[in-house]
Amino acid sequence: MEQQQSRCYRSPLINMMKAAGWDLNSATESIEPGRPHKKYVFESYIYQRMFSGRELSKPTPRGLSESIHSFMQPTYFVRVRVLKTLRKLHAHFLLKITMQESIFCRSKYLILIHPKMEASFFGNLDQRDYVAGGGHPRTGFYQAFLKLAKPVWILHRLAYSFDPAAKIFQVKKGSEFSDSYMESVLKNIVVDEKGESPRVGLMVMPGFWIGGSVVQSRVYVSGVKVVESRRRFSGIP
C-alpha cells in the first residue's frame, strides 16, 4: 500500500517541479550525488521524510548484516495479517480523522514540502500557512499527499499492536546487497559471479521487523546488469 501511494505522490511532485521550471538533474544531484534513476531518488526523498521522527521504534544495531540472521524470513501469514489490518484501518481513516492523525499529516507535509519548494510551485505560501494553522486544503496536490500520509500513519499505529512492537531499519549506501532483508527496485538483475558483490546505491524505502519476520527494505542496487524482459506475442516465436 505504501509503495503504491509513494509512487502516486512522486508523480505530482515531479510534475510540479517541471511546471515550475526546476532542473530535475540538479535537484536529483542535490538529494543524492551520483544520481541513480531520478524516480527512485525522489521516492527515497519522500520515504526518508515520511518515516522520520519517533513515531515508529528504530533499532540501532551495529550492523544489519550481523543481526539479520536472528530474524525469520518474511512469512505469508504476517503479510496477510498486516495488509488486512491496514485495509480496515484505512477505510476507517477515510471516514474520520482524529486529532493525532491530523497533526501527523500536517507535520509531515510541512517536513516534506520545503517553503522554497512550495513558493516555486504556487507563487506563495498560502497553502503552507493554512496547513500550519490546522487546516487540510482541498487542493489536488495536498489531497494526493493525504493519500500517502494516511497509510504511513496507520503503519505507525499498527506497529505497537505486535509483541514485540514492530521496528524500522535502514540500509546504508555501500552496504552489500542481501535478498534476505533487501528487495531490489530493479527487476531482472544479473550479478557477475566473478566480479564484486552488488552494493546498495540508494535506500528507497526502509525495512521493518514485524512479529519476528522481516519486511524487506527496497533498495537501488549498483554493480549489476538489468536484463530486459521480452514479451511473447501470438504468432511470434
Image: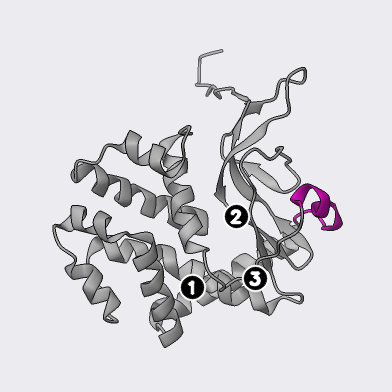
Classed neighbour count for the residue bearing mark 3: other residues with Cα under 10 Å, few (<14), some (14–19), many (≥20): some
Q: Residue at x 65, y 49 (%)?
A: 171
- How far apart are the two marked residues, 1 and 3, measured between alpha carbons? 21 Å
Q: How is the image coloured?
A: one colour
Q: Which residues are magenta?
A: 63-74
Amino acid type at circle 1 is: His
The residue indicated by pointer 1 is 90
Amino acid type at circle 3 is: Ser
Secondary structure of the residue carrying numbered label 1: helix
Split into 4 quadrants, where in the image is the C terminus?
top right
The residue indicated by pointer 2 is 206
Q: Which mark is residue 57?
A: 3
Look at the picture and state if 105 lies above or below 38. Answer: below
Depth check: give the residue in front, 77 or 18.
18
Is 23 left, or right, of 150 in this rendering? left
Q: Nearer the viewer, mark 2 or mark 1?
A: 2
